[in-house]
Amino acid sequence: MELRHLRYFCVVAEELNLTCAAERLHMSQPPLSRQIKQLEHEVGAELFERGSRGLRLTTTGQFFRQHAIQILEKVDATLESTRRMARSKRVMFGIGFVPSVFYGQLPLLVRELRQKDNVELSLAELTTVQQIQALKAGRIDMGFGRLRIDDPDVEQEVLFEEPVMAALPAGHPLEGTTPTLEQLSHYPLILFPAKPRPSMADMMLGLFRRQGLKVEVVQEANELQTALGLVASDIGITLVPEQVRRVQRDGIVYTYLADKHITSPVICSRRRGEKPSEIMQDANRILEVLVENRRSGRYP
């Protein structure tokens, strides 16, 4: 399927008349009719009802039209953004991140890079596994996650380790304490993200498993904010990296664990063996300062 098929379809769907649609598209009617039939064959469904009074969209056609319009608008917007970038000589720099790292230093990195006149930033919320794929495909240039993944095309740098905390419903029996994993294992656990895996969810389960503890997983959530909402609803508890405590919401309290050695890494991923661009060098310099501030306690 080509973009022209979608454009032809949208014009015909608007006109509901092949002759008028062909005039708008500056083509004759027979080729347009063939293109629409070819599209229907590829979709595997009739998009138009053909009658003596003209054309009508089928239910399938109405659904297809909504999505075709969205696709074409996205393509047009992307083309326009690309042209603007070319005219302004700006360079695209993509950053992927897991949500739990966006409450610490990452917004400061983004803010400083945005101040540079020659940079067009693209941010994408991705799991660490998705970041590796995006790096190899060239969709992003730098990723921030929490999983160590062995891939010959990607290098990973552990920026720092941060404590893991328990997020509890307000009024929970363990509120105000520094609980052990054994104590936490007696309460229903909320995991996130539910998919794709491996993820932070597997890290949480691994903490209990290594101590021979069994836990009851009462709910899985795809997003951090959903998991916290479930905690606030008293569905269960969850484990989060320290940065997440900056998310203040009613019904949730955060507490450090008794074992201070239980940590979660913040890992920066980049393409291996690639000569750093000017923008990458700037990002690395900014990141070095931010990480040192974090390690020294100036930005807890």
Image (cartoon, rainbow, N blue to C red):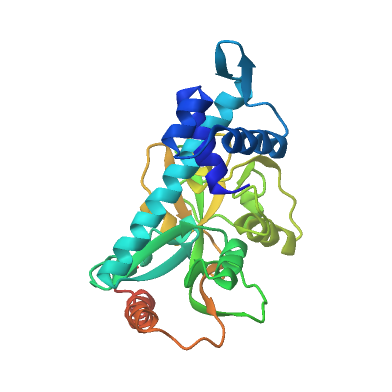
**Quarter of the rendering containing residue 24:** top left
Where does residue 37 sit, x and y in percent of width and height?
67, 33
Residue drawn at (67%, 77%) of the image:
151
212 or 35, nearer to the observer: 35
Residue drawn at (27%, 68%) of the image:
87
Where does residue 246 sit, x and y in percent of width and height?
36, 54
**Quarter of the rendering containing residue 149:** bottom right
**Quarter of the rendering containing residue 48:** top right
87 up-or-down from 79: above or below: below
- Left or right: 120 with respect to 212? left
Number of numbered callouts drawn: 0
187 up-or-down from 133: above or below: above
Residue most extreme to the top: 53
Please say whether residue 7 is visible from this viewpoint: yes
Residue drawn at (40%, 84%) of the image:
277
190 or 253, nearer to the observer: 190
128 up-or-down from 78: above or below: below
Residue drawn at (49%, 66%) of the image:
163
Where does residue 249 sit, x and y in percent of width and height?
37, 41
Please say whether residue 169 is visible from this viewpoint: no
Where does residue 130 sit, x and y in percent of width and height?
59, 61
261 or 104, nearer to the observer: 104
Quadrant into which the C terminus falls:
bottom left
- Left or right: 296 with respect to 125? left
